[in-house]
Image (cartoon, rainbow, N blue to C red):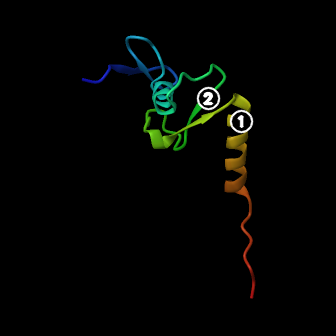
Amino acid sequence: MGRKTYRDAQGYLRFIDSGKLVHRWKAEKRLGRKLLPQEVVHHENKVKTDNRYSNLTVFESRKAHRAHHIKVAWTKTRRRRTLKR
């Protein structure tokens, strides 16, 4: 039987017994080690309750995580060039 969870005020899933964030726990299982306090776990599809391994990316810091968001925003908004014949 799985461990019981609840959704916190920010919309993330936490374990009832420990209060630990489920996505951080899943990332630790995948990496085979405890996450460092400064490491950030990012949900690629922006769905806070989607904790599949394929949807989680670990960043070494908040700064690296922020840079990822800036890069994604830039690539979505940049103008596409087309070749005219």
Residue type at mark 2 is Val
Count of numbered circles in the view: 2
The residue indicated by pointer 1 is 64
Residue 45 vs residue 79, the one in the foreground: 45
Kindly identify which numbered label has been placed on residue 50. Answer: none
Q: Residue at x 72, y 44 (%)?
A: 70
Residue type at mark 1 is Ala
- Residue 17 point in image, percent of width and height: 38, 11
Q: CA distance from mark 1 to mark 2?
A: 9 Å
Rate crowding at label 1 as few (under 14), some (14 to 19) or many (20 or more) other CA atoms within 10 Å: some
Q: Quadrant of residue 16?
A: top left
The quadrant the N terminus occupies is top left
Residue 32 vs residue 14, the one in the foreground: 32
The residue indicated by pointer 2 is 40
Looking at the rendered structure, the secondary structure element under dot 2 is strand
Q: Residue at x 69, y 29 (%)?
A: 61
- Residue 63 point in image, percent of width and height: 74, 32
- Residue 85 point in image, percent of width and height: 74, 88
The residue sitting at the left extreme is 1
Q: Residue at x 62, y 21 (%)?
A: 36
Residue 57 vs residue 43, the one in the foreground: 57
Up-down relation of residue 71 to residue 47 (above or below): below
The residue sitting at the front extreme is 32
Q: Residue at x 48, y 38 (%)?
A: 47
Q: Quadrant of residue 76?
A: bottom right
First of labels 1, 2 by sequence position? 2
Rate crowding at label 2 as few (under 14), some (14 to 19) or many (20 or more) other CA atoms within 10 Å: some
Looking at the rendered structure, the secondary structure element under dot 1 is helix
Q: Are marks 1 and 2 in contact (CB under 8 Å)?
A: yes
